[in-house]
Amino acid sequence: QVTLVESGGGLVQPGGSLRLACEVHGFSLDFYSIGWFRQTPGKEREGVGRIGTSDSTYYADSVKGRFTVSKDDDKNTVYLQMNSLTPEDTAVYYCARARPGGFVWSLSASDFAYWGQGTQVTVSS
């Protein structure tokens, strides 16, 4: 059974850092890309970044230079390191498995299936 479980969310002050983790089960990171997304009430889910099977990474312009996606294949876990956080980064963050055959740089939610339950990140003083 394919599952993805996010963890690491919480409350952080502006300018602070947070690392999210996405533990995957039922498949290997050797064969599937993983994406990170975020969503706030009333808005569409926004792609933040993704990591491919060969560790190639792609980021949304809004987080480029501040967020980093990495993975540990042995732990079946993908990470999202978030630095220089601002209140605009407040959202529920999700990880998802990419559908086979899509563009390797895509951050469109429709190109991903099997989503985690999400973890709340709140940036506030």
Image (cartoon, rainbow, N blue to C red):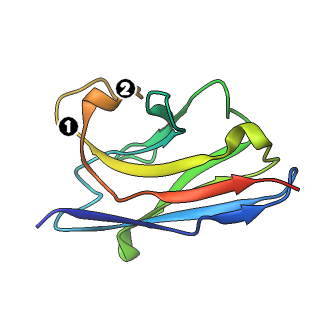
The kind of secondary structure element at disc 2 is loop
List the single residue furthest toward the front: 42
Which of the image's four quarters has the C terminus?
A: bottom right
Q: Quadrant of residue 64?
A: top right
Say which of 116 and 56 sits in front.
116
Say which of 38 and 48 sits in front.
38
Residue 97 placement (x, y as % from top left): 28, 47
Residue 114 placement (x, y as % from top left): 22, 50
Distance between the alpha carbons at the discs numbered 1 and 2: 11 Å
Q: Is residue 3 left or right of residue 91?
A: left
Residue placed at 17% from the left, 29% from the top?
101
Eye-nearest disc, 1 or 2:
2
- Residue 2 seen in the figure: yes
Which residue is the site of mark 2? 108
Which of the image's four quarters has the N terminus?
A: bottom left
Label 2 amino acid? Ser
Residue 59 placement (x, y as % from top left): 56, 32
Q: Is residue 65 left or right of residue 53?
A: right
Near mark 2 (Cα within 10 A), the count class, few <14, some 14-19 or many ≥20, is: some
Q: Is residue 77 left or right of residue 33?
A: right
Say which of 117 and 55 sits in front.
117
Q: Is residue 35 above or below residue 30?
A: above
Which residue is the site of mark 1? 99
Residue placed at 35% from the left, 70% from the top?
76
Q: In this view, does 21 lie to the left or right of 11?
A: left
Dot 1 or dot 2, earlier in sequence: 1
